[in-house]
Image (tube, coloured by chain):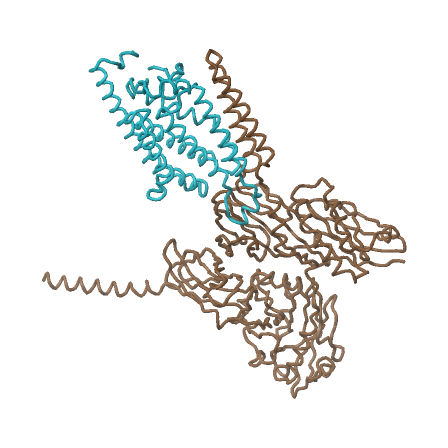
Chain colours: A brown, B cyan
């Protein structure tokens, strides 16, 4: 009886274990979407979406994307780690979007899910079959005409992407030349995807929107924000002959098709057929949106043999954008930041005086102490006091003022304003300097930016100090560590609403600038470049609308700019009483800046270039747990067209 | 407790605190370190050091120079080589008994050595503080480095005194043996026992002060143990000398009681 009971218990245990095992092994699944339909352009920011499906159990941990760059031959291999926290309950699914930059295809991309020290999931992706050398033309639709990719322009790499995998950052479109969507797809995008898309267009992106078949979606507020369409109705056409003029091939079909009769505010109609706008183009910031009044996925367009010509023509309509206005060399900026490091060693003169004074006092007191008698004890006491005094001077005088802050930073921000109605392009550099071993966490809320490090060309190391880019709801956080007496530079690229507004007018006698400065501080050391001449103008006060009047007769008396004039302009900078870091930055950057402006805009007599300096950082870094001292400088460049009012 | 080292400038004391020769030696030592600091201090700006990834050498060089100077001065003090010249010429060859030899080590010699090694270090402190703090060395690391100097000085002092007790003041063998021991401790240990080499430890403190606590603890433990052994041996030798003197009834501790 006991044996039978034992057998039953054993069988029951085996059954329970066999039932439990599938639950355990079911776990979760991880899927990914790299770039645009699995392809990416080297050295360009690329979207990467990871989808975790926790079918069997709750999943929590850290999702890591490890990108390895550099070459073993050059000895500059380093890893950039992007992470985000994962906390999924059982039977749920979530997409984790990243925007990464891939600089090499010879190292695998690693996707890893870690829970404390255990690795729950790890996959290496061989990047070699995924890279391309062409920019992308992306059709972001779930369903497209079968051969649409084959008729897109050859000079671009065509990719069909599911809308859910479109980037959530504007710089995720770095490698995209043209994005093709149906209007209805805009409605399906997540908020962040839509914001990224509209920012990308404003910054110079090129978007083609097809009316599609769901005309109801044209009233969607998102679409109206992007493209204010006024629908008058729709018409049935059986051909679009005007396309013959547009792209050398007429669209004809056997069956009639629907064309939307709609206008777009502040736009230009590029093609009309029977008074119906067929192709409309609207400028948005620096970018353009082209609206097609028909569905490009349906016949007769989807079977039309002129599609390649059509898409080529569409692509050729994108105007070139002159951005950035001025392109300072990263290494030169880094050098100027190095020169402006907040801490410094005591100068030689004060060290010699300190040592000399101490030796003289010591010699005098020891001489007195040598003599026997009661005064020996008195002088011994003086000696002790002197030792204490000089030690305190060594500590308070040489260490406290300059080196006590063992972690400091400085920043340089360059803002290019080309059109006050378009976002200003911002390049921001931050240098972190430490005299001690240090772990730091840094973020730049609330901005969206692409982040990369810069290695100084003077540095013997070719790889940066290690850092991790942590993606949170509030933005990116940089978690890094620095060794004693080391540094790191980060560069951020972002776009902001233009902080300057105004205009420039000229009559026979005067050039008048009306400037509204929305920056938090005054612009100082302002220089204008007009008609091949540089001229210092007054400071532009913060929060003010200011008028600057320049006598053209006086301007003409100034010698046309040449290399020789750089020194005299630099002397003006040396003479002012601005902060040391501002002076150092101006000294390093201004000569090349003046030459670049002259070279680039000497043949633009109807434009004026304004260069101003703000002795503070426009973007403030936020450090976790520590508040290191730092200095910032902002340089703003503004190109204004000059209106002539005679 | 006797304080002959404070009041008696004669050669009855191995290193009278206020003797002319000793004070001149201290002054010369400080001048050497001062010149060393000025000549060899880093002239590169912070930015260049950061670019190259180097650390300023001021701290290590100044402390290393001080270590060598102060160790040698203490070695001479322990061996009785720094008594005033006048007495030296007249009485050196006679190898006159000293207070350190005639009084119990724990009651006189050891206390004198501990105190004197510390006082000899004090005149160097302003220069050391300048070198350390202008290299952004923290107060903790500075104190550790001063601790290294003090323990090294004390070790050399005890070694010199051991040579004096073993071979006397006029012995050539004692003279060279004491200096050989100092050279082995200060320089040669870096070859076979870097953990107890003071120069190596100072270099480590210069390069990575944040991780210097553990090596400093090892160094201090080993050197303190060596000093303890030397104290015991010196004490035993003095006790034997006093007993021998008592038995012969020539000179002994009673003279100074």
Q: Quadrant of residue A327?
A: bottom right
Report x, y in % for residue B228.
Answer: 29, 29
Residue A431 visible in the picture: yes
Total numbered circles? 0
Given the current orientation, which residue lies at the most extreme left position?
A: A1
Q: Quadrant of the N terminus of chain A?
A: bottom left
Report x, y in % for residue B19.
Answer: 43, 19
Residue B217 visible in the picture: no
The answer to whether residue A155 is above or below residue A377 is below
Q: Quadrant of residue A201?
A: bottom right
Report x, y in % for residue A528.
Answer: 78, 52
Report x, y in % for residue A127.
Answer: 48, 69
The answer to whether residue A332 is above or below residue A245 is above
Locate residue B1 relative to residue B49 in the image: left or right.
left
Locate residue B238 relative to residue A585 in the image: left or right.
left
Out of B220 and B27, give the one closest to the viewer.
Answer: B27
The answer to whether residue B232 is above or below residue B40 is above
Locate residue A281 relative to residue B222 in the image: left or right.
right
Q: Which residue is drawn at 51% across and 35% down?
A: B36
Out of A272 and A487, give the one closest to the viewer.
Answer: A487
Q: In which quarter of the image is the C terminus of chain A?
A: bottom right
């Amino acid at each position: 009886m006991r044996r039978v009971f034992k057998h039953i218990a054993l069988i029951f245990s085996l059954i329970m274990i066999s039932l439990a095992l599938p639950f355990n092994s079911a776990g979760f699944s991880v899927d990914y979407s790299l770039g645009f339909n699995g392809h990416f352009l080297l050295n360009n920011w690329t979207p990467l979406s990871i989808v975790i499906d926790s079918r069997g159990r709750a999943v929590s941990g850290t999702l890591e994307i490890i990108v390895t760059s550099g070459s073993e031959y050059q000895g500059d291999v380093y890893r950039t780690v992007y992470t985000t926290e994962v906390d999924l309950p059982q039977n749920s699914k979530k997409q984790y979007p990243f925007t990464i930059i891939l600089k090499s295809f010879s190292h695998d991309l690693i996707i890893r899910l870690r829970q404390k020290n255990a690795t729950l999931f790890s996959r290496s992706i061989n990047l070699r079959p995924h890279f391309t050398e062409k920019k992308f033309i992306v059709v972001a639709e779930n369903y497209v005409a079968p051969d649409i990719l084959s008729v897109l322009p050859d000079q671009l790499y065509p990719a069909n992407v599911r809308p859910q995998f479109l980037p959530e950052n504007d710089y995720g479109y770095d490698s995209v030349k043209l994005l093709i969507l149906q209007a209805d797809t805009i409605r399906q995008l997540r908020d962040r995807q839509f914001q990224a898309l509209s920012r990308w267009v404003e910054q110079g992106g090129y978007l083609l929107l097809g009316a599609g078949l769901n005309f109801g979606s044209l009233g969607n507020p998102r679409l109206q924000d992007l493209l204010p369409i006024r629908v008058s109705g729709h018409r049935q056409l059986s051909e679009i002959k005007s396309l013959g003029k547009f792209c050398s091939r007429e669209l004809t079909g056997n069956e009639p098709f629907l064309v939307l009769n709609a206008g777009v505010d502040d736009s230009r109609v590029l093609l009309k057929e029977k008074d119906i706008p067929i192709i409309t183009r609207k400028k948005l910031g620096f970018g353009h949106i082209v609206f097609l009044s028909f569905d490009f996925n349906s016949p007769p367009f989807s079977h039309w043999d002129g599609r390649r010509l059509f898409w080529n023509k569409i692509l050729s309509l994108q105007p070139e954008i002159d951005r950035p206005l001025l392109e300072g060399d990263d290494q030169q900026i880094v050098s100027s930041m190095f020169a402006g490091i907040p801490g410094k060693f005591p100068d030689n003169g004060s060290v010699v005086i300190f040592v000399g004074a101490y030796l003289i006092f010591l010699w005098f007191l020891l001489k007195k102490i040598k003599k026997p008698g009661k005064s020996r004890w008195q002088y011994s006491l003086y000696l002790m006091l002197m030792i204490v005094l000089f030690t305190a001077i060594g500590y308070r005088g040489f260490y406290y003022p300059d080196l006590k802050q063992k972690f400091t930073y400085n920043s340089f921000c360059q803002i290019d304003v080309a059109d006050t109605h378009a976002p200003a392009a911002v390049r921001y550099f931050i240098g972190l300097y430490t005299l001690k071993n240090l772990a730091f966490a840094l973020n730049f809320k609330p901005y969206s930016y692409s982040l990369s490090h810069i290695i100084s060309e003077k540095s013997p190391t070719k790889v940066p100090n290690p850092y991790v880019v942590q993606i949170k709801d509030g933005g990116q956080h940089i978690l890094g560590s620095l060794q004693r007496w080391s540094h790191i530079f980060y560069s951020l690229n972002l776009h902001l609403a233009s902080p300057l507004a105004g205009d420039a007018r000229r009559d026979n006698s005067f050039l008048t600038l009306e400037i509204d400065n929305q920056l938090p501080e005054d612009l100082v050391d302002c220089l204008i470049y007009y008609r091949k001449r540089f001229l210092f103008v007054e400071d532009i006060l913060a929060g003010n609308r200011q008028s600057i009047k320049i006598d053209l007769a006086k301007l003409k008396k100034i010698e046309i700019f040449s290399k020789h004039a750089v020194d005299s302009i630099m002397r003006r900078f040396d003479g002012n009483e601005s902060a040391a870091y501002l002076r150092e930055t101006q000294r390093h950057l201004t000569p090349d800046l003046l030459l670049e402006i002259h070279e680039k805009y000497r043949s633009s007599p109807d434009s004026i270039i304004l260069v101003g300096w703000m002795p503070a950082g426009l973007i403030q870094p936020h450090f976790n747990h520590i508040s290191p001292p730092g200095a910032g400088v902002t340089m703003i460049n503004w190109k204004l067209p000059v209106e002539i009012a005679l | 407790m006797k304080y002959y080292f404070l009041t008696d400038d004669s050669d009855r004391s191995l290193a009278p605190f206020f003797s002319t020769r000793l004070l001149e030696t201290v002054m010369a030592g400080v001048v050497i370190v001062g010149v060393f600091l000025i000549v060899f201090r880093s002239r590169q700006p912070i930015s260049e050091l950061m670019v190259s990834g180097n650390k300023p050498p001021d701290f290590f060089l100044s402390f290393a120079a001080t270590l060598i100077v102060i160790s040698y001065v203490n070695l001479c003090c322990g061996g009785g080589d720094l008594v005033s010249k006048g007495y030296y010429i007249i009485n050196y060859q006679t190898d006159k008994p000293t207070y350190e030899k005639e009084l119990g080590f724990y009651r006189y010699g050891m206390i004198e050595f501990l105190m004197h090694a510390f006082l000899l270090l004090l005149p160097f402190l302003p220069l050391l503080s300048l070198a350390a703090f202008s290299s952004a060395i923290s107060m903790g690391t500075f104190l550790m480095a001063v601790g290294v100097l003090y323990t090294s000085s004390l070790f050399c002092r005890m070694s010199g005194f051991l040579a004096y007790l073993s071979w006397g003041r006029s012995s050539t063998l004692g003279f060279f043996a004491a200096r050989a021991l100092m050279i082995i401790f200060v320089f040669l240990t870096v070859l076979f026992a870097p953990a107890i080499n003071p120069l190596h430890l100072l270099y480590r403190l210069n390069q990575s002060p944040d991780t210097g606590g553990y090596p400093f603890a090892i160094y201090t433990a080993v050197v303190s143990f060596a000093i303890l052994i030397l104290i015991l041996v010196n004490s035993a030798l003095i006790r034997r000398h006093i007993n021998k003197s008592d038995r012969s009834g020539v000179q002994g501790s009673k003279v100074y009681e």
